[in-house]
Amino acid sequence: MAEDQFAAFRHRSYRRYFTSRFLTAFSIQVLATAVAYQIWDETKNPIWLGWIGLVQFLPGLLLVVVTGMTSDRYSRRNVMASAIILLGLCAATISAMAATGFFNPLWVLAVLTLVGVGRAFHSPASSSLAVNIVPKEDFANAVGWITSSWQLAHILGPATGGVLYYFFPALAYGSAVLALMISAFLILSIPKPSQKMSKEPTNLKTLLGGFEYIWKTKIVLGAITLDLFAVLLGGAVALLPIYATDVLNIGAIGNGLLRAAPGIGAIAMVIFLTRFPVKDHAGMILLVSVAMFGAATAVFGASTLAWVSIAALMAVGAFDMISVYIREILLQLWTPDEVRGRVNAVNSIFLGASNELGEARAGFMAAKWGAIFTVVGGGIAAMGVAALCGALFPELRKARKLERD
């Protein structure tokens, strides 16, 4: 039976939260698209594309116990807003560099390191806040739309970044600054939500509480591990500028279209999932979707036709959307509120490893073996990860319901 597609939007705080999440993700995508293309255009060295991902991942890794505890000890709304403001300041700095012609890759990487700090605090706070502003019965619907806001940003952000960069690079960065300032205002306008703050004494056990909980909860551990290695090995986003210029010959605007394509597929999938949510066989659906994500990635990597490449990336986004949807519901509904920030901080490290560290892996491999070998091989490896996780985590494979009994 079809369900109410817009149940979560009946809550005013969620509407503001949703818009803020979209604007933040949109800005990050505009920034990522413009920075990656400009660095590639000036250096023609894929190693620099790898460093873009690495410098944004390392802050989250090094600060994981701090960011998680901050989200559990302090207002998640305020932590989230502060992180967004820091991201806005970083985008403004890069905009100034582009406008003045002082776009030195080393200095840009330094600013992107601060972007990594902002994202490290934003991720656990924003993920944990959703549960505090939406009733449990509407949470699955809320997750679908939250992830859709991220995917919509992955459509509009790259396309906007590509077009604005074509006319004037600083304009692309400036649009990110404006969107981030609006995003921060929206979060601060949400009435103070109910939150069970951790009152445990600060010691090694409480700092590592997120790791301990994930390790003991095998379904959550399996879902996070699956995503980590599948996207770490199968991610191809960092190499899209190479495909746009050297493989498909479609230029800066084409680069924006390639980055937008996964989001188009994901939006189509989220519309389906919000109307027909996963009710049974959740574990098997998750494993199969990750395997298909890998297959679609391999097709993209081997393609030399723009329309085939775009279609393959749309499929990548659709299957990844299923994975994100199931994993996020499992993670939030299975985790107690007082430890949710620390658990989400650990999850953000897994996501960072799969995304930013995956970008670094792709850039460094492409420098040695070429982009096509890197992407095709990564897609095949992601399919293997799905099979291996199905064998190593039988609790995940046999899981049927998303909510905890």
Image: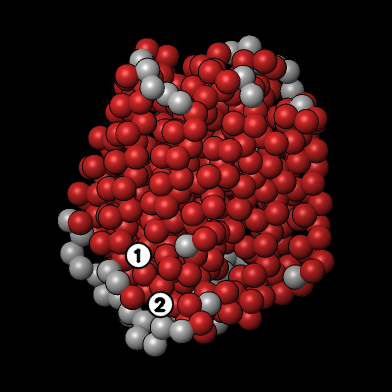
User: In the image shown, does 109 or 145 lie closer to the viewer?
Assistant: 109
Q: Amino acid at mark 1?
A: Leu
| Residue under the point 70% across and 51% down | 230
User: In the image shown, does 171 or 326 lie closer to the viewer?
Assistant: 171
State whether residue 35 is above or below residue 280: above
Q: Which residue is mark 1?
A: 129
Q: Position of residue 247 (x, y in %)?
A: 69, 17
Q: Position of residue 18 (x, y in %)?
A: 33, 51
- Residue 221 found in image quarter: bottom right
Q: Amino acid at mark 2?
A: Asp
| Residue under the point 33% across and 53% down | 83
- Residue 364 lies left or right of residue 171; in this view the side is right
Residue 367 visible, this angle:
yes
- Residue 93 lies left or right of residue 289; in this view the side is left
Q: Which mark is residue 156?
A: none
**Mark 2 burial class by Cα count in 10 Å: few <14, some 14-19, many 20+:** many
SS at badge 2: helix
- Residue 391 found in image quarter: bottom right
| Residue under the point 62% across and 15% down | 245
| Residue under the point 53% across and 18% down | 42
Q: Which mark is residue 337?
A: 2
Identify the mark nearer the N-term, 2 or 1: 1
